[in-house]
Amino acid sequence: MKNQWRLLIALLIVILIVIFAILNGDGVPISYGFGEVRAPLIIVITISLLLGSILTLIVTTSSTRHDKRELKSLREKIDNQEFETEEAIKKVRAQYENRIQTLTTIIEQNKNATQESPVVQTKSDYPDGSHPDQS
């Protein structure tokens, strides 16, 4: 059904173009600077339409190429930044893991030192000078 509508619309457009061509069959003078030519108006309109289409195609193609180059450049930049970010994350992670390992070692050493020599608290260790065992 959808294709039938497209066919019908295309047929109507062709009929309108044919009617337009029949109505504009009169000859018109075309001056191009150093000479003059007579041609049917429909030919002049058709050639103008084709030249405009070609010019539009050239402009959009060059613009599209420029946009594609810029897009490619930006994608490469993003890839490089992602790589640099991943490398920075790995470096920071390694630093933190190293620091955690160092702190774990220090904690273990302190725990072992505490177990080997228990701390005896004296009166001077308490702010008010009183020992909890002495009441």
Image (cartoon, rainbow, N blue to C red):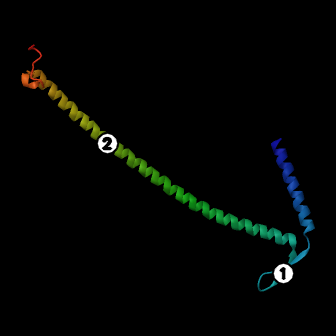
Q: Nearer the viewer, mark 2 or mark 1?
A: 2
Residue 82: x, y in percent? 42, 47
As drawn, the label of residue 24 is none
Where 21 sits versus 110, above or below? below
Where 112 sits versus 98, above or below? above
Q: Which residue is mark 2?
A: 92
Residue 116 quadrant: top left
Secondary structure beneath label 1: strand
Residue 37: x, y in percent? 84, 81
Q: Which residue is mark 1?
A: 37
Where 118 sits versus 29, above or below? above
Q: Residues within 10 Å of mark 1 (few under 14, many from 20)?
A: few
C-alpha separation, residue under disc 2 versus residue under disc 1:
78 Å
Position of residue 38 in the picture relative to residue 57 (left or right): right
Instruction: Identify which amino acid the numbered label 1 is placed on.
Output: Val
Does label 2 or label 1 sit earlier along the sequence? Answer: 1
Total number of numbered labels?
A: 2
**Quadrant in which the N terminus is drawn:** top right
